[in-house]
Amino acid sequence: MSRIVYVNGEYLPEEDAKISIFDRGFLMADGVYEVTSVLDGKLVDFEGHAVRLERSLTELDMAAPATKDELLAIHRELVERNGIVEGMIYLQVTRGAPGDRDFAFPDPEETPSTLVLFTQNKPGLADNPAAKKGIKVISIEDIRWGRRDIKTVQLLYPSMGKMMAKKAGADDAWLVEDGFVTEGTSNNAYIVKGRKIITRALSSDILHGITRAAVLRFAKEAQMEVEERNFTIEEAQDADEAFITSASTFVMPVVEIDGAQIGTGTPGEVAPRLREIYLEESLKAAV
Ligand code: PMP
């Protein structure tokens, strides 16, 4: 059965959904996106994603295609129409289709932004078996642009990073700049030393993960110590635990970095506990 997707005000079967070849998202990666997870048919941290979307749009001088309330209604309608219990909602806004190719931004009065949303059905998302075993990562150089705090659709290098990981027999890659880990290809990166959670501080070097914000808040509420600072791959390899966070993986233990086993090579205590708390609290607060 085909999905019902949303394109510029319309709900359509996916095969009928169309975007112009002049859309700047297609020609120039001139677009931003959000991924909100669905658990128990409800949206996890919709507010966080909506606020970050607004910030991404503002930073790029892009017009907002809808209000927060309208976006919430569209998300809910798609969950309903597609019968999603566990999965994700992908949302993308681009600077529209000016009808020709030009580097200069079009006048937003004449070229409305494009808004597309679709669902990804993922039964068992919260019960991902990888969370029990942990994942393996490799390190690669971070050669992305300097505004990683804006969630743009320029995802070629993260895709290449995932392919490099796959080729190396690993699950994902951590990006390293000037000797320090920035983040994962599509997630934030953490290590645990003596029960202290260490993760890079927020700046334009990394995406300000919505899951990161929630997990650090829950960790502090559970009296766990959090230190926001840079760390190296060597320090990570020597840590007691490592993990990643994102809206679709929640909290995922990392058990190997560049072939070196982390701790006992199994998920440890802190990351699985944080995953448990995150899933429990997110479900409670889901809309
Ligand atoms: N960093 C990058 C580069 C990402 O692509 C993502 C996920 N989109 C994250 C971090 C995690 O962000 P969130 O927790 O909001 O999914």
Image (tube, rainbow, N blue to C red):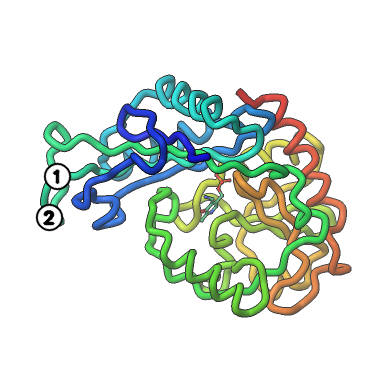
Measuring 82% from the left and 55% from the top, which residue is drawn there?
132
Q: Quick check: is the Cβ at mark 2 less than 8 Å away from ligand 1?
A: no
Circles 1 and 2 in contact, beta carbons < 8 Å = yes
Q: Quadrant of the C terminus?
A: top right
Label 1, secondary structure: give it: loop
Q: In x, y percent, where is residue 38?
A: 61, 34
Q: Quick check: is the Cβ at mark 1 less than 8 Å away from ligand 1?
A: no
Q: Amino acid at mark 2?
A: Asp
Q: Quadrant of residue 181?
A: bottom right
Q: Relative to residue 264, is residue 226 depicted above or below? A: above
Circle 2 packing at 10 Å, graded few (<14), some (14-19), many (20+), is few
Q: In x, y percent, where is residue 156?
A: 41, 65
* Residue to which mark 1 is pinned: 98
Q: Name the foreground residue: 209 vs 133.
A: 133
Q: Is residue 287 left or right of residue 142?
A: right
Q: Amino acid at mark 1?
A: Pro
Measuring 74% from the left and 52% from the top, which residue is drawn there?
197
Q: Quadrant of residue 247?
A: top right
Circle 1 packing at 10 Å, graded few (<14), some (14-19), many (20+), is some
- Dot label at residue 134: none
Label 2, secondary structure: give it: loop
Measuring 22% from the left and 52% from the top, which residue is drawn there?
21
CA–CA distance between discs 1 and 2? 9 Å
Q: In x, y percent, where is residue 73?
A: 46, 21
Q: Name the foreground residue: 25 vs 17.
A: 17
Q: Relative to residue 140, is residue 36 depicted above or below? A: above
- Dot label at residue 102: 2
